[in-house]
Image (cartoon, rainbow, N blue to C red):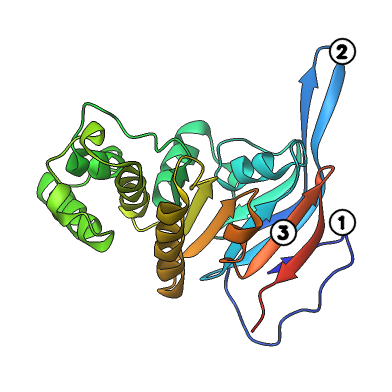
Amino acid sequence: MTRGPDRQAERAPTTQTTTVACLEGVTKVYPMGVTEVRALAGVSVSFEAGSSGAIMGPSGSGKSTMLNLLGCLDRPTSGRYLLEGQDVAELNDNALSEFRLRHLGFVFQSFNLIPQLTVRENIELPLYYLDWDADESAGRAEEMAERVGLADRLGHRPAELSGGEQQRVAVARALAANPSILLADEPTGNLDSVTSRQLMSLLSELNAQGKTVIMVTHEAELAKYAQHRLHMRDGVIDRIDEAAA
């Protein structure tokens, strides 16, 4: 992970890495009546393939705004966001939606599962929008459910699952299209401490297998699972802590 000129730059790594996401001098300003709120104030940072990062900071520091930009759920006011080398500003809304489906997987605090659908159908949902063949989608859903330990729950609906199981379904759905990056927004916020540790162990396992994982969390204990901890303050990266070798 490297930072840009908003703070003193870190020394460039000596080994060659592949950058999957890069913010270059990104600002985000929200109009609030006659005033403006500057949520991000010139952030430059890059994430390498297979890395893990935790974005931290107090309320209003810009961490959720950064995650929304990384997830292509919002666009920068100025600066550039490159995802897999593509400047997302060059994509229209339809192209951006498809690009997001192919390259990004999302895990939310509230799970965001569709209650009327089974586990299998929830996992298949992004594949439906990507026009996957029905048999291929079903096979992929089975593969992902097994990967998160829910192979015996494919026919169940969310209401029949525990909170931890629902979040595992959300992880399986996020992984279905084999995205470059897994983005998690306070993923343990609705889970008890034991289930939280189980989920973080799963995310760590996925990261160890090569998946890039970026999460927002206010919990220092959970941030310890990440290789890089980005501390946000007043719309900039105040510092980055690296995990001990």
- Name the residue type under label 3: Leu
Q: CA distance from mark 2 to mark 3?
A: 32 Å
Q: Is residue 221 above or below residue 58?
A: below
Mark whose residue sits in front, 2 or 3: 3
- For this orientation, the residue located farthest to the top is 33
The N terminus: image quadrant: bottom right
Q: Residues within 10 Å of mark 1 (few under 14, many from 20)?
A: some
**Front in this rendered view, residue 227 or 130:** 227
Q: CA distance from mark 2 to mark 1?
A: 27 Å
- Name the residue type under label 1: Asp
Q: Secondary structure at mark 1?
A: loop
Q: Secondary structure at mark 3?
A: strand
Q: Secondary structure at mark 2?
A: loop
Image-based side of 24 in relation to 182, left or right: right
User: Can residue 8 be seen by looking at this rendering?
Assistant: yes
Residue shown at the point (62%, 64%) measured from the top left: 47
Q: Quadrant of residue 9 in the image?
A: bottom right
Q: Is residue 42 above or below residue 122?
A: below
Residue shown at the point (20%, 35%) measured from the top left: 160
Image-based side of 112 in relation to 45, left or right: left
Q: What residue does disc 1 label? A: 6
Q: Is residue 66 above or below residue 37?
A: below
Mark whose residue sits in front, 1 or 3: 3
